[in-house]
Image (spheres, rainbow, N blue to C red):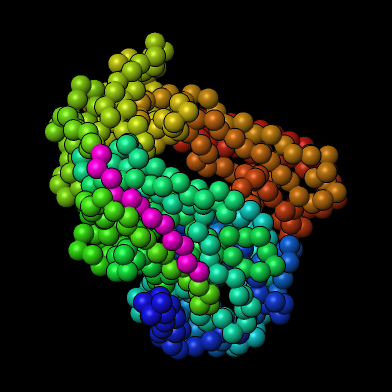
Amino acid sequence: MKKLFLTIMLASLSMMAWSQDSNDIYQPPFDFPLVFSGNFGEIRANHFHGGLDFKTQGATGKPIRAQANGYISRIRVNTGSGYVLNVTYDNGYYLIYRHLTKFTEEIDKRVKDWQYEHEQWEVDIIPEADEYPVKAGDLLAYSGNTGYSFGPHLHLDVVEVKTDEFVDPLPFFSHAVKDHTAPKAEGFMVFPQRRKGVVDGQTEAKTYNLNANAPLKPIYAWGEIGVGLKAYDHMEGVTNRYGVKLLLLEVDGEEVFRSEVARFAESEHRYINSWTDGQYMKQFIEPGNKLRMLKASNGNRGLLTIDEERPYHLVYTLTDGLGNTSKAEFTIIGKKQVIPADDTDEKMIFRWNEVNILQQPGVDLVVPRGRLYDDLYLDYYVSKRAQDVAFTYQLSKKTVSLHDYADLSIGLTQVPIEDMSKFYVAGVDSKGKRYSLGGRFEDGYMKAKVREIGTFTVGIDTIPPVVTPLNPQQWGRSGTVTLQVKDEHTGISTYRGTIDGQYALFGKYNSVNNHIVCYLDPDHVQKGGKHELVFTATDECGNTVTEIYNFTW
């Protein structure tokens, strides 16, 4: 009991220390109660969620107020975050407001003028520090659903100026947040280490669901294993699930591992691929993982050695950003089991701390040092369909993420067309679907840079994108021209529209639905007559389509 009390106190002190380090509180961005749809550090594909997602009562256009005194330091429009505003405050942090629906009138005009002058929807403007000063409570912008957004909300990042690192925004707003719900564990995972461990008679990782109505069956293990936990934080009054701020693992009363999601640098994002397996957080550190938020204290990177026939008692302590705490307990029973021998060819093992080169007929792969998080045992297999222009090379059955790019070359077996710009290196997913990785042709090979090791081949794309007008009969009434632009192979590279021969401002206001929209502007399109729209789209292999539409507005 004393050890548990000490563990909880250490977790609380850690939270308090971070709050004190932040040395400030911010006034809320909205005048209604704060509820979140996402929190800092949540597990996402290839990255951590960098901020807080504030719910906006299911609507767009909510006024966003400045949190303190400072100045607007960056103005952007892009497909990922939509309308974006950076505000640098006097306390040493800058805040990034994403997915906005619009800026203030003055900034909106500056953005639109820039877009038409440069004939480009995407914008990145760095104002002078004295151009747009703000005081606490000033109107900054309006909340929205632009960019890659699945619903109305405000994504807010807090970045420390001196380090340019993302920090947890919650301590700045904790005074305005009501939450008494602790995190909850939902699943448990055991990772037998290759050639060194086994669990329940098998060498593959195994998951165990935690269901209050069905007690966990005994887990029998032997040798060296790692463990992982699937857990989420919750907030009363909503059904959203959030990431866990602080996780502590004790085995037989001794701390083995802890993770505290408090800050990270841009360069650390991809380490999430090493720390997690799906939604399971590993309580051990792979040798190439340099993520600072992970701490192992047992001298073996958090890996457990099960070498006695007895119960090993595991206790997790889970704490959220407001200090709400819960526990989860498991028992792994040590039981002697045969650890199968591994006869993998040494040439098919990539070492995490070395430069690795695979040279096989028709395929070369060079993985520089520092790209792998752990040793990789290749599952090399070659196949080919009659119509293919190259063999398909399986290097790993399960896609393995790299921390940075590696160089891949695949030889062509036939060249059915002369235009080599139509060829591309393709990744192949678990369902056999191909996706473009780009690339260039050189000396009989297609070459590309890849950030994962899986299955690869070469494809040809000679088919232009397809442009579909959406509800064209409504364009005149709504003042909005909406097109759907799709490309099944390599994806859209560029697009451009003109109305009556003049540049028309088309953009992806919401990247999830993939619609390209132009809001008709009487300053650039004369209202009260017939108009001709000419729209051109080009894919990554240079295939182009041009469509012409007539409408009245």
Instruction: Specify whether residue 16 is in view.
Output: yes
In the image shown, does 318 or 268 lie closer to the viewer? Answer: 318
Image quarter of residue 342: top left
Residue 109 x %, y %: 65, 69
Image height of 540 relative to 288, above or below: above
| 157 relative to 141 in the view: left or right | left
Residue 278 x %, y %: 44, 48
Highlighted magenta segment, given as a residue range: 326-337
Image quarter of residue 291: bottom left
In the image shown, does 70 or 549 lie closer to the viewer? Answer: 70
Q: Is residue 479 magenta?
A: no
Q: Main secondary structure of the magenta part?
A: strand
Residue 513 x %, y %: 65, 45
Image height of 460 relative to 332, above or below: above
Q: Does the magenta stretch include residue 330?
A: yes
Outermost residue toward the top in this view = 386
